Image: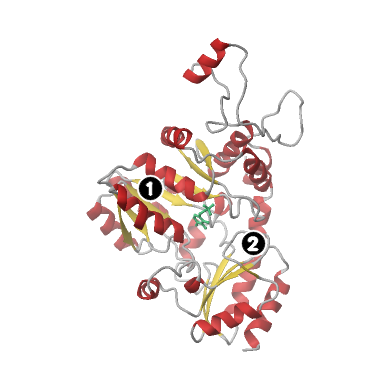
Amino acid sequence: MKAKTLAVRAGQTRSHFQEHAEALYLTSSFVFESAAQAAARFAGDEEGFVYSRYANPTVAMFESRLAALEGGERCVATASGMAAILAVVMTFCQAGDRIVAGRGLFGATQQLFATILTRFGVTTEWVELSDSDAAATAIRRVRPRLVYCESPTNPLTELIDLALVAEVAHEVGALFVVDNCFCTPILQQPLAFGADLVVHSATKYLDGQGRVLGGAVVGAQVLVNEVVRFLRTAGPSLSPFNAWVLLKGLETLPLRMQAHCAHAQAVAEFLAGHPNVTRVYFPGLPSHPQHALAKRQQRGFGGIVAFEVAGERQAAWQVIDRVRLFSITANLGDAKSTITHPASTTHGRLAPEVRAAMGVREGLIRLSVGLEDPEDLIADLDQALTLR
Ligand SMILES: *Cc1c(COP(=O)(O)O)cnc(C)c1O
């Protein structure tokens, strides 16, 4: 079935009450009919719920729905996006293993790889994966356990050719992991291009209304089963309440993504024609260097737009301080549009020269374009840019 149908219908189970909406099972444990049944459930000889760190009916509905949308065999939910990423690394890596990671990853993912994993002997090589030749050369040289990327990247919206990277990763026996947070399965299904695992920060578009934290790992049954084994022991499971919020979020995901894409396109086109904007980063503009790849790999161009104004930090901060509609917050994927200065927030911990090498300049501003009327968003940006 199509995404709009799966988003509303996939994965629902009903109790004997026959409730129409998905039920919220806010319980930490489940009772057994006998000591023998308890033993059988614990041993895994009998199917059924035991304890919500292992599995929960509301969480299971969210997992099934997201697996259906991603076209994956199995999904396991986690307490946050970072918990999903940590679970994948802890499941598949051991001391001595290497990771090849794309540049331009989410800040906390970079910190996890660069500072925490190194203490356990897992090292990361940072590669410009958006450059296909550089990607292939580095993966063949490093022979990593994992190849890890986001596409498009944050904040510069660079794309990675997923089919190409998947092929080279498999050639050296690596697992290819894609953080699909920016596109969601509505715009891009990495598994269809050969990725082994998809990770999500459900906190962003899957919720879509900025309410709860959550994450997920999706992929083949044999791989996700391993991640489940780690999670049920290590503990960063998703709360049933958060799963219930996210489950309802998925119902409107296809419609929301359509609107995010349309509004972002309008905002990007406006910015591209504004005299005080020196550069716009958005895969939906024909001037984007990977516009053709974006058309091939994605079903829409997403809701994230970055742009530069001339001058230093002060010029960018002035625009941010002058907008009235956009919220000044680093969150993204919300119904509400947000505005961020990456160089002093999400990328503020990086050394200035590292930031410069990544292309995150002082004049750069990132927008997550929300569901407000794009005419109002454009008017707001226009007054903020023109008063300068
Ligand atoms: C926010 C985010 C994460 C981390 O997710 P949390 O739910 O905040 O833990 C990971 N990847 C990307 C691309 C993100 O935007």
Q: From the viewer's perspective, is 41 left or right of 326?
A: left
User: Regarding mark 2 in the picture, which secondary structure is present there?
Assistant: helix
Where residue 369 appears, x then y in whole percent? 63, 66
Circle 1 sits on which residue?
176
Residue type highlighted by circle 1: Phe
Give the vertical position of 248 relative to 15 (above or below): below
**Residue at (48% x, 56% y) in the render:** 297
**Residue at (66% x, 64% y) in the render:** 370
Q: From the viewer's perspective, is 25 left or right of 77?
A: right
Asked whether mark 1 lies closer than 8 Å to ligand 1, one says: no
For the residue pair 241 and 1, the one nearer the viewer reads as: 241
Give the vertical position of 51 relative to 242 (above or below): above
Q: Quadrant of the C terminus?
A: bottom right
Where residue 365 appears, x then y in whole percent? 54, 74
Residue 324: image quadrant is bottom right
Within-10-Å neighbours for mark 1: few <14, some 14–19, many 20+:
many
- Residue 296 visible in the snapshot: yes
Q: How is the image coloured?
A: secondary structure
User: Regarding mark 1 in the picture, which secondary structure is present there?
Assistant: strand
Mark 2 or mark 1, which is nearer the start of the sequence?
1
Residue 133: image quadrant is bottom left
**Residue at (44% x, 73% y) in the render:** 360
Where residue 325 appears, x then y in whole percent? 70, 72
Circle 2 sits on which residue?
260
Residue type highlighted by circle 2: His
For the residue pair 177 and 68, the one nearer the viewer reads as: 177
Within-10-Å neighbours for mark 2: few <14, some 14–19, many 20+:
many
Q: From the viewer's perspective, is 49 left or right of 92?
A: right
In the picture, the disc for residue 350 is: none
How far is mark 1 from mark 2, CA to CA? 28 Å
